[in-house]
Image (cartoon, helix red, strand yellow):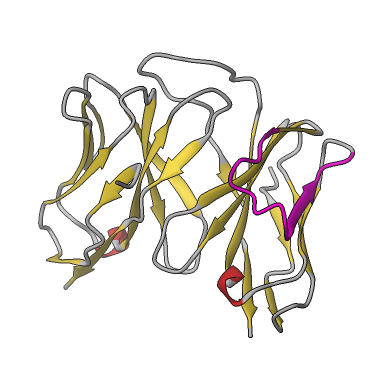
């Protein structure tokens, strides 16, 4: 089974330029996540989609970041304009999307991560 | 205070050693707990879930102490291939939102 696909794998841009990343989740996965991982830190959730609807975008810097998943399958994340501090790895993940609400003491759905896009802003 | 805190390491251990990683979380309403493994320049992958009763998977043992809001991972008989960063991960609230710690780096040496 194919995993989560992301492109490009690497991107170098100058500050104030725009950049877009693409993600294709595992087939049949309804939930898609975008994470930002700065060097030396753990991934931080930027936005979560359930099908084509946004579940959580509380940590997305909306003045410069935007994301869409128009047909409920693949997704794009855009940064416009980029800042130096946006240099990071942008990880896309997906999960089946069947789990909702609370469970006590048991695992939530497994999230499967793509290889990431490494962004360097100069 | 960070939501999930880990000692960043690195932990340098000889092959065959036993090593333990600890993690604390701040949200007492957290529901589920995991350890993810991330190899250098690769994506995170689920290593194991952590259950209240503790659980074991081969050389790996995970434990949860809800009262102390503390999670641990024990690796016995370390292999060179265990060298990676181990991320403590907590799920709180609805929507399957994961919060990651900064990770603990492990280097297993000959």
Image quadrant occupied by the C terminus of chain A? bottom right
Residue B57, by quadrant, is top left
Image quadrant occupied by the N terminus of chain A? top right
Residue A61 falls within the magenta-colored stretch: yes
> Residue B24 appears at what percent x and percent y?
24, 40
Looking at the image, the residue that sits furthest to the front is: A63
Residue A70, by quadrant, is top right
Q: Left or right of A67: which side holds A101?
A: left
Decide which of A39, B62 is in the foreground and name it: A39
Work out whether B105 lies above or below B22: below
Q: Left or right of B68: which side holds B36?
A: right
Residue B66 falls within the magenta-colored stretch: no
Q: Please tell me which residue is depicted at 22% across the width and 24% down the height of the picture.
A: B66
> Residue B12 appears at what percent x and percent y?
16, 68
Q: Left or right of B16: which side holds B51?
A: right
Q: Please tell me which residue is depicted at 10% across the width and 57% down the height of the picture.
A: B17
Q: Left or right of A9: which side holds B101?
A: left
Decide which of B96, A47 is in the foreground and name it: A47
> Residue A95 appears at what percent x and percent y?
63, 34
Work out whether B75 lies above or below B42: above
> Residue A121 appears at what percent x and percent y?
64, 79
Q: Is residue B19 visible?
A: yes
| Predominant secondary structure, magenta span | loop
Segment colored magenta: A55-70
Q: Please tell me which residue is depicted at 30% across the width and 23% down the height of the picture.
A: B51
Q: Can residue A115 be seen in this view?
A: no
Q: Please tell me which residue is depicted at 13% across the width and 65% down the height of the picture.
A: B13
Work out whether B11 lies above or below B53: below
């Amino acid at each position: 089974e194919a995993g989560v696909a992301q492109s490009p794998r690497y991107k170098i841009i100058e500050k104030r330029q725009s950049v877009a990343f693409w993600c294709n989740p595992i087939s049949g996965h309804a939930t898609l996540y975008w994470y930002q991982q700065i060097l030396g830190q753990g991934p931080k959730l930027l936005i979560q989609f359930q099908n084509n609807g946004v579940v959580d975008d509380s940590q997305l810097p909306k003045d410069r970041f935007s994301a869409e998943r128009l047909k409920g399958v693949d997704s794009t994340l855009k940064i416009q304009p980029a800042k130096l501090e946006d240099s990071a790895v942008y990880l896309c993940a997906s999960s089946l999307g069947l789990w909702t609400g609370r469970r006590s003491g048991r695992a939530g759905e497994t999230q499967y991560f793509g290889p990431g896009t490494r962004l360097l802003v100069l | 205070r960070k939501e999930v805190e880990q000692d960043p390491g690195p932990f340098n251990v000889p092959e065959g050693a036993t090593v333990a990683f600890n993690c604390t979380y701040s949200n007492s309403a957290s529901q589920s707990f995991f350890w993810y493994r991330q190899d250098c320049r690769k994506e995170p992958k689920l290593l194991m879930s952590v259950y209240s009763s503790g659980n074991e998977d081969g050389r790996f043992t995970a434990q949860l102490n809800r009262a102390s809001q503390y999670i641990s991972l024990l690796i016995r008989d370390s292999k060179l291939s265990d060298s990676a960063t181990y991320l403590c991960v907590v799920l709180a609230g609805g929507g399957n939102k994961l919060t990651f710690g900064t990770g603990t780096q492990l280097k297993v040496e000959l």
